[in-house]
Amino acid sequence: MPAAPDQLADLPYAHLLQPHAGPLRPDESYDTAHFDGLAFEGRANGASFLECALTGVELQQTKLRQARFNEVWVHGARWVAVELAESDWQDSAVLASVFAGISGYGAALRRVVFRQCKLEAVNLRGALLREVVFEDCLLRDVDFGGAKLTDVSVPGSTLEEVRLNGATLKNVDLRGAVRLGLPDGPQGLRGATIGTGQLFELAPQFAQALGITVKDS
């Protein structure tokens, strides 16, 4: 499980952070910058963030297509209608944040932790997720259609209207989920591990997919 410090001061690069002021710009490189309590909108496609901290940052209708986030720590963020298509995330943590109406198709996430976050209406179709943890999160209307998920887990998380149709799963552990709301039923679950109780909950959908009629009398 990737490391995810709870406090800004616990970051290995905390002593290097410098306050950032001003807008985000396309193709700009931000290194050891601290974005605190700022609000952004507009275009910053191709921007690069290395060893940065974003605390209390609000993004509204911001374009961050093909942006790169490497060793980035996000806390208390609110991102609404943000374009993150084909963005790249590595060795990063997102804590206590809200992501709504996000376009993240084709994104790549490697060794990323989401903790106590709310993800609603998030499009991750065709995305690549490797060693990603959703811990104590709410995933509502999240679309992983056609995505590739490897070594992904969801401890303590609630999944509502999560779509896995056409996804490729390997070592995906869903046993820790509080709820598995999968409107597509068992489609896309090949390669996932679920618990016995979850299997019973999904049994009607499995029966329907197999064309089985279950009657007790």
Image (cartoon, helix red, strand yellow):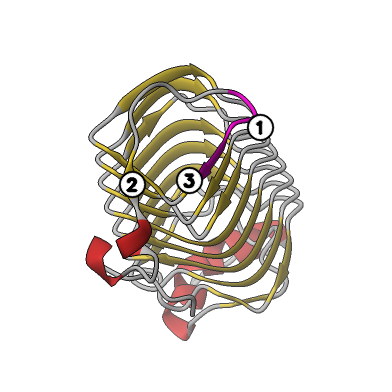
Name which quarter of the figure residue 179 lies in.
bottom left
Tell me the SS state at disc 3: loop
Mark 2 lies on residue? 18
* Disc 1 target residue: 46
- Magenta stretch, residue numbers: 26-30
Q: Is residue 187 magenta?
A: no
For marks 1 and 2 on the same chain, the one whose residue lies earlier in the sequence? 2
Q: Position of residue 125 (x, y in %)?
A: 68, 42
> What is the C-alpha distance between the residues marked 1 and 2?
21 Å
Asked whether residue 29 is drawn in magenta, I would say yes
What residue does disc 3 label? 161
Q: Nearer the viewer, mark 3 or mark 1?
A: 1
Q: Position of residue 156 (x, y in %)?
A: 33, 70
The CA distance from mark 3 to mark 2 is: 40 Å
Check disc 1 and give the amino acid type.
Gly
- The residue lying furthest to the bottom in this view is 196
In terms of sequence position, does the residue under pointer 3 or pointer 1 come before the other? 1
User: Amino acid under label 2?
Assistant: Gln
Pointer 1 local density, CA inside 10 Å: few below 14, some 14–19, many at least 20: many
Q: Position of residue 28 (x, y in %)?
A: 59, 31
